Image: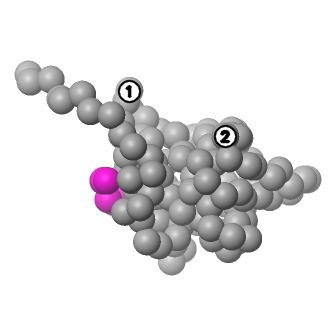
Amino acid sequence: MEKPALEKVNLAEKFDQINDYWNPRIAGELNGQQVKLAKFQGPFEWHHHEHEDEFFLVVKGQFEMHLRDKVVTLQPGEFLIVPRGVEHRPVANEEAEVLMFEPASTVNTGNLENSERTRKNLERL
């Protein structure tokens, strides 16, 4: 089996390819996990993930992770892990560039599989 070429990923270049919001793209894969990039703006839907934890790292801008009992504001260079089963809603008052790391099986809208924002077949950057 041929080994894949090792190439670095430039996040700024990858984010420049994204021109919409709440539509994650795959930037890399390892050990059954995916590195996903998305731009956030405005509020997302309340949802949870039954089987997957989610990792959110702010690259540029900021956003708030609304939880039922508090709001966590994330700035560039900060990350938050939302454990499986915890209801959450990201809200970005201005555009934010966010890196997510999660199992390949994770659907962005979790338990809301028929939302207009549900993305199951993600584009690769």
- Circle 1 sits on which residue? 31
Q: Name which of mark 1 and mark 2 comes first in the sequence.
A: 1
Which residue is at the far bottom?
A: 116
Measuring from the top left, give residue 27's x and y in whole percent.
Answer: 37, 46
Q: Is residue 83 above or below residue 41?
A: above
Q: Secondary structure at mark 2?
A: loop
Indicate the amino acid at tag 1.
Asn
Q: Which mark is residue 114?
A: none
Q: Is residue 103 above or below residue 109?
A: above
Measuring from the top left, give residue 52's x and y in whole percent.
Answer: 57, 40
Q: Which residues are magenta?
A: 121-125
Residue at left offset 63%, top offset 48% = 58
Residue 124 within the magenta-colored segment of the rendering:
yes
Measuring from the top left, give residue 18's x and y in whole percent.
Answer: 42, 65
Residue at left offset 39%, top offset 43% = 10
Q: Disc 1 versus disc 2: distance between alpha carbons?
A: 24 Å
- Circle 2 sits on which residue? 77
Q: Residues within 10 Å of mark 2 (few under 14, many from 20)?
A: few
Residue at left offset 44%, top offset 46% = 11
